[in-house]
Amino acid sequence: MKLFVRVIEAKNIPAMDPNGLSDPYVKLKLGKQKFRSKVVKKCLNPSWCQEFTFKVDDLKEELRISVLDEDKYFNDDFVGQIKVPISQVFEAKDKSLGTAWYPLQPKSKKGESKECGAILLTICFSQKNAISDLPPDGNAVLLPRKYSDSALYSSSRSSPVRGVSPVGSEEAISHKEDKLHAPTFAGRIAQIFNKNVETTSVSSAEAIDASELTGSVNSLVTEHNSEEQSSSVGFEELMKNMEMKDQGDEIPSSLPGGVAADQLYAISPQELNTMLFSPDSSFLKSSSDIQGSTDLQIGPWKFENNGGTLKRVITCTKAPSKLVKALKATEEQTYIKADGKAFAVFASVSTPDAPYGKTFKAEVLYCITPGPEQPSGEQTTRLEVSWRINFLQSTMMKAMIEGGAKQGIKDSFDQYVKLLSQSVKPLDLKDVGSEKDQLLASLQVEPQSDMKLAVQYFANFTVISTIFIGLFVLVHIWLSMPSTIQGLEFVGLDLPDSIGELIVCVVLVLQGKRVLEFMSRFMQARVRKGSDHGVKARGEGWLLTVALIEGSNFAAVDSIGFSDPYVVFTCNGKVRTSSIKFQKSDPLWNEIFEFDAMDEPPSVLDVEVFDFDGPFDEATSLGRAQINFLKSNISDLSDIWIPLDGKLAQACQSKLRLRIFLNDSRGGNVVKDYITKMEKEVGKKIKMRSPQTNSTFQKLFGLPPEEFLINDFSCHLKRKMPLQGRLFLSARIIGFHSDLFGHKTTFFFLWEDIEDIQIMPPTLSSMGSPIITVMLRPGRGFDARHGARKQDAEGRLKYQFHSFVSFNVAHRTIIALWKARALTPEQKVQIAEEESKANGVQTTEEETVAKNVHASEEEVEGKSLLADEESDAKTLQTEESGSFLGVEDVKMSRIYSSILSLPTSFFMELFRGGEIDRRVMERAGCLNYSHGPWESEKPDVHQRQVYHKFDKRISRYSGDVTSTQQKTRLYGKNGWLIEEVMTLHEVPLGDYFTLHVRYQVEDLPSRSVGCNVEVHFGIAWSKYTRHQKRITKNIVSNQQERLKVMFSVLEKEYVSGG
């Protein structure tokens, strides 16, 4: 979705400058997206009239708009701001707040009385080409295809921004029904579960055949909305209108259910779109007949939402089967993109008459995009059809529906593709040639003979003047007579006889030396003429191809005002070098470099440009750049100008033009093979994560779709105050995320950035847990420096993680991934030898700690959680590799509310760290209770760490508990708000959740001594387990009992005088 913001004007801006005026401008921020308006000089009622567009991925975010006054020599002055929740815009009518005046608010509450002026804004969601805006399907949110299809169709999936042209609402469409006999997706899907009906055996009348159920998945029911008048224009005219309205949005990404069809055809995108979706298409009728659908009725295409979307509704009746009667089906098709080059149609399907038909809808996305051009110059088109099941209600049949739909939809679209192939010729990608091959084939290395290069290289003042002086001296020797021997001269040694002759000799020697250096450099450079251009990659895996096109504005480091540049590419320890271009500031290479296949996708590509000074001289760097594949869209790298860093490069604004392609030449078992390899290194089975889990992980850290999650662990990040969160491990990164008291901390760095990993013994500050210290290389990981414990004098960042639920597993996994990714074979051997020696001299204390940790892990894996009966405990086992659910706000519910006969000030003794605090917690079943001091995080906000063990009567596992508490005063009341986040250790499934508790206490004005206490509780699940309800019920019941004990003991302490 895209959020549209128009900044129109402001009024009554306070004067911030001494001249009684201001120079206002506007800053807009949504998440990490930032924009800034122009500056209006010397004005208190400025007008901007500027438009900004934000990409919205999370409706929980907040749009912040600030007005500032520009100062030339000092920091800009803050004028005022407004904050608009995105959810407020989304829930508004037509998803728009309209155009309205918003009063500007000061930064702090102290300045509330200050008048900051007002700003006129238009805020709304763009309703064009967004599936998420479809009224019937609130869950249908599709993200742009940022990384999909690698580079194969990258250029064809983007389109220029086009102007918007309104379409008159008075236009009417009228089509004769006898021309509208078109098949539907409902007809195709209707047969999914109905195949082989005669051979299906049913054990009981109530049994539901999975194939029957899938048949109902693919029939359609959506309400037909005919608010708009029909248009009398033809299908081609409708497409032209859509093309005029297109705003250049990207093709949406594939639906998560899977890809049912993906084929290349020898036809243009416009013709294929007409064949599949035109009301007059004979292909649609043929497809409907194959599915056996009857009573086919196709509504006309209509513009809805003020011309924003183009929809049509199709109904049909599916043939009856043994267990399912004839089903009435409806399909609603919506164009979400049609720019004349690419088309995307979203179909929503439901069958309310089928078993459980009211609980789900089938959704299908048709994407028609241009393919690579054929050698003959003819166009090709790629058709991709993806699907998913959108569950509207919870149902026990979810697994059966999804399982049956997967195979049924595949079979249905196999028939669909087969029928289409009878009308349009399908193409093999190998016969056509990929976009990468076509782009690289067009590159021609500039042909230059050695003679031409020699003339170009030696045609300079130094060489020409040296030749002239040499000829002059030779002519002089020929014309002059031999001089008499005098001074220290003897036969064969003629020394200069004057200062002038001495100077001439020195000049001749220096000139000759420079010419010889020129000749040596030229000959050495010609030896490297071919460089690594054209060397083919070897092996199967991730293939990286880099095309070096040209350079621009390289610094002149030679005395004659030029340079001799060449480029060095480095990736995963492999180096490729270009040829040298003599005397060029804007060189043209057109050279292609391929890196041998890699098992894992590369993280970065280092590029550096050097000036050639000879084989024995140190090369001068003309600039460098680093391309991070985790932060770049692969399709955007297919043709890109890269600015170079470095003093010389930045001074001259040097740039390098590259074409970069990255693709995997292996099959679909890459992830499985990699995880199998890691299991051998870790010594423990690692479960492959689901596509939904990987998608959540990728969105959390902004990673490309080829990145997959290997494992994640609950832990603490050691900083000034330990921060509870989760550590995520993938093939290329190690990332950390925390959402504590509403403050999110997210960062990641590459395995290649790590210089060393060390294990530190437990300390009091680490709550008795060993600490994993990760040290980065100098100058690396600065994007993640906000999570570092410290930075040494050499610029190396250090991160410390502790309090893992399964320390041994976490440590082994981290070390295995680091070794596999970042270390050379020599380093691996060295580390193995050091570990072997360390194991031989391990102290008794370390052995004891390791045994205790290992024993606790085995106990965790062998026991059940929070069960009262032994038989129930056996059914509940740890699920260490459960699916990561992502990060979302915790739902809190009130579990305790009471009026206590004590003042608020005495209640807070429970959190002050004194004797009362310790006695109450011990009576409540907390053993070895210890805590850190309260430390100020912000004004009026304090935090501390707490550690204790549960008594056996509270938990049979006596698990350790680490928690973070935060206290703040209630605004405008005599009371406090205390929030606590707890993590359970050495408890089965303790790594699956964190406990959140909120205490709110305030004095009662109606009583001289008394306070009102409310306690809210919630569980944040980070992984899925089928025992969630059971665990939640047990923990809530236990927490309520503990609260009663705590407050009862606290009242007794107050009565007894503390």
Image: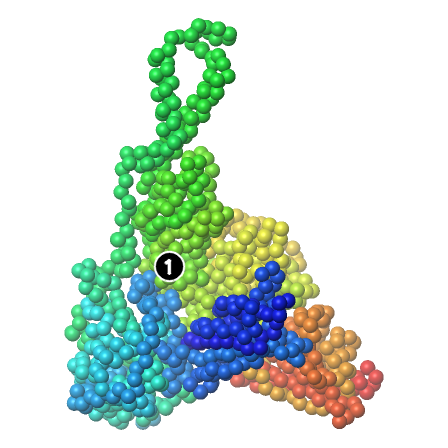
Residue at left offset 36%, top offset 53%: 658
User: How many marks can you see?
Assistant: 1
Quarter occupied by the N terminus: bottom left
Is residue 529 visible in this depiction of the protein?
yes
Q: Nearer the viewer, residue 775 or 499?
A: 499
Residue at left offset 54%, top offset 67%: 41
Quarter occupied by the C terminus: bottom right
Is residue 961 visible in this depiction of the protein?
no
Is 74 displayed left or right of 222 in the figure?
right
Q: Quadrant of residue 530?
A: top left
* Identity of the residue furthest to the front in this view: 19
Q: Nearer the viewer, residue 716 or 558?
A: 558
Tell me which amino acid carries mark 1.
Answer: Leu
* Image position, residue 547 (x, y; %): 34, 52
* Image position, residue 53 (x, y; %): 44, 73
Residue at left offset 48%, top offset 48%: 651
Looking at the image, is 741 positioned above or below residue 136? above
Q: Quadrant of residue 963?
A: bottom right
Residue at left offset 50%, top offset 76%: 9
* Image position, residue 525 (x, y; %): 36, 37
Q: Nearer the viewer, residue 810 or 932?
A: 932
Looking at the image, is 262 positioned above or below residue 631? below
Is 200 displayed left or right of 683 in the figure?
left
Is 792 displayed left or right of 826 in the figure?
right
* Image position, residue 919 (x, y; %): 76, 78
Q: Where does label 1 land, which residue?
A: 637
- Give the class, few, some or many, for how many residues have Cα within 10 Å of label 1's Cα (few <14, many ≥20): many
